[in-house]
Image: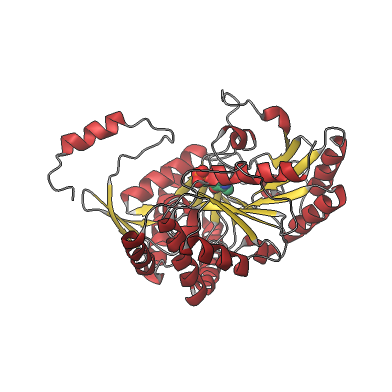
Amino acid sequence: MFNKITFDEILEGRRALLDGWGGRPGIIIIGAKGAKLRDSEGREYIDCTSQAFVLNIGANHPRVIEAVRRQLEETTHVVYNLDSIPLLLLTRKLAEIAPDTLSRVNFCLEGSLASESAMKLAMKNRPGCKYFVVFEHGYHGRNLLTMAASWTDPETPFSYFKENVIKVPEAYCYRCKFNLHYPSCNLECARFIEETIEKHRDGGVVALMMEPVQGNGGQISFPSEFHRKVREICDRQDILLIWDEIQTAFGRVGKMFAAELYQVVPDILVFGKAVAGGLPLAGIMTRDNLKVFDAGENAFTFAHFPLSLVAALATIEVLQEGQLLERCNRLNQHIIHHLRNLQKNYQIIGDVRGPGLAIGIELVKDRDSKEPAVKEASEVVRLALKRGVMFGISKYGGLGNVVKIKPPLVISDEEVETVLSVFEQCIAEVQRHG
Ligand SMILES: Cc1ncc(COP(=O)(O)O)c(C=O)c1O
């Protein structure tokens, strides 16, 4: 398809691109399969980012490709207020696999929009209330409301809605805000969250919105007990609990949803990223007794995108039928065990954490001071890329010292060994040059 295009024409495209992400390594990807990416120079990479944690079942899964190909012959676009078979089959399927009673589903194409839909629905259900409680290093998207609800650069010009957002420290046990240790801390952070909600009773808190495993803000997983306490607090304070499962749902944590892993059910669950096996789709699942949207309140032109809907049906089937969730848990044990062994030899590895294939390695200059090794983390990622392994890095949350291993669940055993070996080589090199 691109045979007649010259390299200069491609570079003109790069100059014209108005980038909103940053940090482009200048790689042109031309193909992908499973856990591997291929670039225009013929190099291959094992992808431990799953391309922004989307490709849980691997790139170009044949079942997804086949479902999309068949749908292409039928129709590619239907307006949202008409029904289609893919729409009805997918809502039925999601209602069937939903945690507990989260059986009402709404779609859009971007996670940020889905997070905001969740916030809007929560507002409908707590009329007159105006505050959202969120975590300090949380991330919920990049439109104006979700930016205010996410960790943001203090210099950001996009802070219009900040006065409606209250930030509280999350259970970041490696760097406890209260200088305590779990479990003897008795989860002081949870007590603080409840006190904060109580203090804002006058204005009224709509909801507490959180990621069950914090992705962009440091790949931080919380104790299960913290999740249970937060649920109890929301019930006691009569506010809604929104779980942003955009990164965690559809296999990433070794279960279909983090709600299953932690056995805590939010009132509204936000999904996105991996749901459609590489096609754009996001949305919310809500408790069946919540007030729903009125006409026009959450209507988007492309919210009914049959290609993504059939891709999601195929993706869920692959996750249900295959052994991918078991595989994800098995690989977690292997990788975490290996990394904890490395930790004995490399002082720079401060903490190793995470369920499923949502693994974070926090690098520090010194184990006692825990000074974040930010440049070193970037260097590990850069060196690994040269060796054909693409690691993620946590740039949000004000730290940027957490290297992430979040490959597709279909990564082969051999690829895992390569990833671990490259990781050790890079850590050794970075530690040597201190
Ligand atoms: C937890 C979480 N919420 C929301 C978003 C925003 O999703 P999108 O980039 O699809 O708008 C992201 C994206 O990284 C995310 O990780």
* 399 horizontally vs 378: left or right: right
Can residue 312 be seen here? The reply is no
Q: Residue at x 34, y 40 (%)?
A: 25
Can residue 259 be seen here? The reply is yes
How is the protein colored in the picture? secondary structure
* 371 horizontally vs 323: left or right: right
**Residue 151: x, y in percent?**
61, 36
Location of residue 167 with respect to 422 vertically, above or below: above
**Residue 121: x, y in percent?**
68, 45
**Residue 319: x, y in percent?**
50, 70
Location of residue 232 with respect to 302 vertically, above or below: below
**Residue 32: x, y in percent?**
31, 58
Q: Residue at x 18, y 51 (%)?
A: 1
Q: Nearer the viewer, residue 301 or 387?
A: 301
Q: Residue at x 28, y 45 (%)?
A: 28
* 142 horizontally vs 23: left or right: right
Location of residue 15 with respect to 32 vertically, above or below: above
Q: Residue furthest left?
A: 4
Q: Nearer the viewer, residue 317 or 243?
A: 317
The image quadrant that residue 149 belongs to is: top right
